[in-house]
Amino acid sequence: MNKKSLLIVMIIFVAVIVFAVVGYNYLSDNFESRIPQSDQNESQTKIPARDFTVYDSIGNEVSLSNIKGKPVVVNFWATWCGPCRSEMPYFDELAKKYKDDVVFLMINIDESDVSEFLKENNYSFDVYYDLDYSASNAYAVSSIPRTVFIDEEGYEIAYYSGAMNEKTLESYIGLLIGEK
């Protein structure tokens, strides 16, 4: 390869790197704007939560539209998902802490019985099953874990893709219940 070809390849490589950094920063800024802040303008267009139906451990239907007057945290997960498993202790602890203020819908996306998993890990949260993919389709879940935060009026205020640490999860819950 002559010097001119090498220089062209290096310029293209640098341009690709610059484009990737700029694109990443642009997309990160846009994603961060979906994270609610306590001082956001109330006149912003609210997104109504999309309804779905899941099933509890004994097969009863539970629809999002039937949950009224309380904020809802919807978490999509599976026992085989490492990142999901890493955030489960935080969901369990905070579901206990906020049980009177927030509804937690911990939606297992596969059809396996998770009762043994819950016992082994001493988790006490209720698990719901997305047997007909109603919830997964409603929120276009293509990877897990994914968490959706819905306010007491039934509006989606935020979502988070990936595993959360305890502080992040609690800050979202704080926004749901009006803590600063």
Image: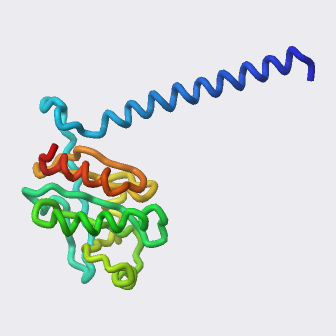
* Residue closer to the observer: 175 or 34: 175
Q: Quadrant of residue 63?
A: bottom left
157 relative to 131 in the view: left or right:
left
Residue at left 42%, top 69%?
78
17 relative to 85 in the view: left or right:
right
Q: Is residue 126 above or below residue 103?
A: below
Residue at left 27%, top 59%?
74
2 relative to 94 in the view: left or right:
right
Q: Quadrant of the C terminus?
A: top left
* Residue closer to the observer: 45 or 75: 75
How was the colour assigned to the protein in this rendering?
rainbow
* Residue closer to the observer: 94 or 33: 94
Q: Quadrant of the N terminus?
A: top right
> Where does residue 112 sit, x and y in percent of width and height?
41, 79
> Where does residue 67 sit, x and y in percent of width and height?
13, 61
Q: Residue furthest top?
A: 4
111 relative to 75 in the view: left or right:
right
* Count of all numbered marks drawn on residues in the image: 0
Q: Is residue 149 above or below residue 1?
A: below
Residue at left 29%, top 52%?
148
> Where does residue 142 sit, x and y in percent of width and height?
45, 54
> Where does residue 171 sit, x and y in percent of width and height?
25, 49
Residue at left 32%, top 33%?
33
Q: Residue furthest left?
A: 69
Q: Is residue 11 above or below residue 131?
A: above
